[in-house]
Amino acid sequence: MALAQNPMTGQMSGTVGNIVTSKRAKQNLVRSKAFKPRNANSEQQQKQRGGFKLIVDEYQSWGGVIELGFTEVPEGQTPYTLFMAENLPGAIDKSGVEPVIDYSKLAVSDGSLPAMIVTEVSIVAEGISISYKTPLRVPRVNETDEVVAIAKTYTGEILIDTKERGAETVGTILIDYPGIQASDVQCCYLYARSADANKASKSVFIRLIALHPQI
């Protein structure tokens, strides 16, 4: 914005082409309009809106299970708002023509408990077997914690199994689904919750195909 005070032109007010003039405190104000107004339908804006819809649809696809993993909810918020805030910035891959969800970055739980440490994953006759460390000397880790293993198939089935963390050095949890193959699974995660269900850890993504390419 520029200031103009010219005795020959006197008071200036109005619009001429790309120039807008007005009067303030005995001075003429001259400013220029934006040459290229922001396009609300640009490719970037379309991807932004598309990514938002993807995360909304993803939340709904879990059928209420997300509430189990987002238990530490501040006043005025909900598990839904926490899920959206956690995943909108990082779980959308916009590198292609259309935005897609990067399931390796999606969080199905989050909270103040330490994240689980996965040691081994395998497809067995009974389902998906996941082994994890039980570091009971780590602050806020308790043997009474509930370990949650959760997966979603490409057909939309939600698979979930839970067990107590336990006191052994290494624990194992089974997602019970006889005959399942790694190629059936869209995503799989592991996290922990406190025994009173008031706290949770951030979910850890389980790479079934990467760990077992022969399946």
Image (spheres, helix red, strand yellow):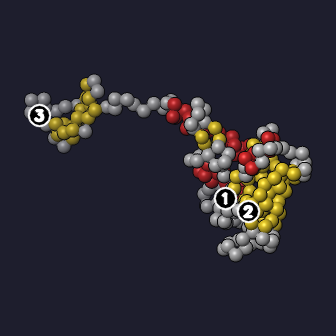
Mark 3 or 2, nearer chain start: 3
Gap in angstroms between the C-alphas marked 1 and 3: 65 Å
- Residue 202 numbered tag: 1
Please name the residue shown 52% across and 31% down the image.
Answer: 43
Residue 56: horizontal and vertical position, in percent?
66, 42
**From this viewpoint, is residue 171 visible?**
yes
Q: Could you tell me which quadrant the C terminus lies in?
A: top right
Pointer 2 or 1: first along the chain? 2
- Which of the labelled discs sits on residue 6, or is there none? 3
Question: Where is residue 148 drawn, in percent x and y?
Answer: 77, 59
Instruction: Give the x, y percent position of residue 200.
Output: 69, 63
Label drawn at residue 192: 2
- Say which amino acid is labelled 1: Lys
Residue at horizontal 87%, vertical 51%?
124
Tag in front: 3 or 2: 2
Q: Secondary structure at mark 2?
A: strand
Asked if residue 147 lies left or right of residue 201, the reply is right
Quote the CA–CA distance across marks 2 and 1. Answer: 8 Å
22 or 107, which is in the foreground? Answer: 107
Going from N to C along the chain, the mark reached first, 1 or 3, is 3
Q: Secondary structure at mark 3?
A: loop
Amino acid, disc 2: Ala
Amino acid tagged 3: Asn
Judge from the rendering whether residue 131 lies leftward or rightward of residue 3; answer left or right: right
Residue at figure coordinates x 13%, y 31% from the top left? 10
Question: What is the quadrant of the N terminus in the image?
Answer: top left
Instruction: Give the percent coordinates (x, y) of residue 40.
Output: 48, 32
Relative to 18, say whether 143 is above or below.
below
Q: Nearer the viewer, residue 195 or 3?
A: 195
